[in-house]
Every structure is written in structure tokens, then in C-alpha cells.
Image: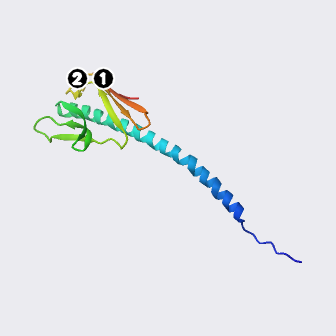
Amino acid sequence: MNRTRTSGFSLVEMAITILVMGLLFAFSIPAYQGITASQQLKGATENLAAQLRLAREKAMAIQMEQPMHWAPNFMNSDYHIHYPSGFIPTYGQGKLPNGITFFSWGAHPKMLKDGRIDFSGMVILQDRRGNRDTVSYLTSGLVLTK
């Protein structure tokens, strides 16, 4: 009796391989979603801080005050910066990613002509999981993120 050996995988080997790959995917997808949500929060924080810094630079460049407002769903944005009277009504409109909310300590900051801000305050951004990042603005004009 001369048997020839055929190469290939058995049905059991294929089932075990698919099961192991399924388990890997099942554990990796929630981790990936957590990383994505974390990066969205960090990106939104950095973007908001950049908008504050840009408004400060613009106020110094054109020598006119730049008020900034936090207003959810104002003209489909969450925050915006006003040009002074005689200019375009708004500029720097920003929309936060889905699932990112914010609340602020202090009223609306105003960037002054000399680079200062009229008062200190902070904006706290939060994602769906409860993670928080903070954008602080100081009267000296410094904008910090944490």
C-alpha cells in the first residue's frame, strides 16, 4: 500500500485559526476605539488653544480687540471669534468632534491690542468616557493646555 501525502490544512486547523484571529480582533477593536477617542480629545484641545493664540496674534497685528465666544450650536459651531465692528461678522468658527463637550470657567475672553487677555479663565473639554483636557488662558496672554 503506497499512500501519497497531500499538503494542506484540515478543517479543525482552519477553525482554530479563525477562532484565534476572531479573539484578537474582539480585544483589539475596543482598544483602538479608546485610542481614537483620546486622540480626538487631544486634537480638539490643541485646536481650541491654537484658535486662542491666533486671535491674540491677530489682535496685536491689526491693533483691534478680538472677542471670543463659547456658544454651542451657534451657526453650527461651538466657539467663534468676532472681528471688530466694520469687519466680517465672525471668524475662527470651530466645531468640536462628536462626543466632545465643553464648559468654561469665566466669561468670554477678549484678546487686547497689546497681546494680553482681559481676564483669566479656562475651558474644560470632556469626551464620552469622562476623560478631560483643559485649555487655560491667562491675563498675560499665555494659553496653556493640560
- The residue type indicated by label 2 comes to Asp
Question: Which residue is found at the position 22% from the left and 35% from the top?
Answer: 58
> In the rendered image, which residue does mark 2 sit on?
118
Direction bottom: furthest residue = 1
- The residue type indicated by label 1 comes to Leu
Mark 2 element type? loop
Question: Which residue is found at the position 37% from the left and 35% from the top?
Answer: 45
Question: Which residue is found at the position 77% from the left and 72% from the top?
Answer: 6
Give neighbour class at mark 1: few <14, some 14-19, many 20+ (Cα, 10 Å): some
Residue 135: percent from left, percent from top: 35, 30
Residue 11: percent from left, percent from top: 70, 65
Give neighbour class at mark 2: few <14, some 14-19, many 20+ (Cα, 10 Å): some
> In the rendered image, which residue does mark 1 sit on?
138
Residue 100: percent from left, percent from top: 36, 39
Q: Quadrant of residue 139?
A: top left
Direction right: furthest residue = 1
The foreground one among 65 and 43 is: 43
Query: Relative to 93, is 133 above or below?
Result: above
Q: Is residue 142 visible?
A: no
Mark 1 element type? loop
The foreground one among 48 and 26 is: 26
Question: Who comes first in sequence, dot 1 or dot 2?
Answer: 2
In whole angstroms, how far apart are the C-alphas of marks 1 and 2? Answer: 9 Å
The quadrant in which the C terminus is found is top left
Query: Relative to 40, is 105 above or below?
Result: above
